Image (cartoon, grey):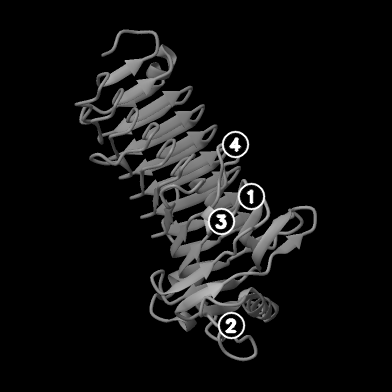
Amino acid sequence: MLAWQLVPALAASDSAPGSLAGARPRRLVVDVTRAPFRARGDGQGDDAPAIQAALDTVAAAGGGVVYLPAGIYQLGSIQAQTGVRYFLLNYRSGVSMVGDGRELTFLRAPAGMPDQTRIISANSADGKSRVIEAAFRDFTIDGNGANQPDARSIVGISNVYTMSIAHLRVRIVGVKGTADAEAACFDSFFSANNRYHGCEAVQRPGEPTGSGFSATQSTDIGYEQCASSGSAYWQGFTTYRSQGIAYLDCQAYLNGQRGLNCEESTDVRYVNCRAGGDAIGNHGDGIYLFKSQNVELVDCASHANQSGAVNIGSSVRILRGQFVANRQAGVAFGSMEDWQNSSIDAASVLTGNGRGAVAIAGLPIA
């Protein structure tokens, strides 16, 4: 099972930007508002070239910190990665992007981005290399989702072919997604050992938006104290064809489909996670498990969703927890075999659901 520890770039200290270097105290720290970069941070013009120059400078020096003081950094320059996708900022191994706090430092995407744009993209996105040990901390990304008429799918921070990428107290809002193109605020794709701690995916009401947190064909990805809300079309958290995924103290609510979604994955653990609550559940099921093996739900709560938890073709252990006040069942199973491949602790609370505590497809409601 995952160890809940951020990579050294974030774990060493939480006090000052320069301390992020951890075991390498002499690594370069640059302020994007100072010479030679001179980003304005006033919400005007285009700060993307200055920030990219700072990222490139730190990467060329062998790693370090790109510091973004409080301000609004408008990103206007859209770059193309040959044969792959568009991006606004491109990061490499050993580079940390650090703001003054997600209420103070903002990166704002421009209107009219092309389809498949990544706001922040790993330089390994073409699959020819792997970015390792990078980090993001204490800022907000605004995807400007309402003003992207030509895009179907945008990604906030895109970690493709990456390893040991850490995210601490980052918020991403308004990332465009459509009913036939999922998109994500935070994405791990063909990656390993990435960590997300205290991060938020917040989608604005009325905007066409995608999922909050996504792991696809990845291994050993950890989410701790993260929250995802408001996806117009998709999930709060989703994992697909991945292994060793752990969620601790995470919350998903007001999402267009499921709160916590797991498909064709193995060794997935949800501990003290919450799908909905009171009258602010998800439009779909709270926790949905599809053809996944060795899944555990430990002390989880699922309230005011379609069903509290659903098992279709999976092996699941439910230890304690509350699956209450859902519109359909507390826990639903696609078949008798799914029921037999699962266990529900006697201490689990399954009351007040519209179609009973447990529902098995084709059988009377229990």
Three-letter amino acid code of the residue under disc 1? Ala
Question: Can you identify the residue that label 1 sits on?
Answer: 151
Q: Which of labels 3 and 2 is toward the front?
A: 3
Q: Which residue is mark 3?
A: 147
Residue 320 occupies quadrant: top left
User: Which mark, residue 39?
Assistant: 2
Return the residue found at the far bottom: 35
Distance between mark 3 and mark 2 Cα atoms: 24 Å
Closer to the eye: label 3 or 4: 3
Q: Describe the element under mark 1 as helix, strand or loop.
A: loop
- Asked whether, in this view, residue 4 is left or right of residue 178, the answer is left
Residue 147 image position (x, y, % from top left)? 56, 56
- The image shows residue 259 at horizontal and vertical percentages of 40, 39
Q: Amino acid at mark 2?
A: Ala
What kind of residue is marked 3?
Answer: Asn
> If the image is split into quadrants, where does the C terminus sit?
top left
Of pointers 1 and 4, the one earlier in the residue sequence = 1
Badge 4 is on which residue?
180
Is tag 3's residue or tag 4's residue first in the polypeptide sequence? 3
Front-most of 125 and 27?
125
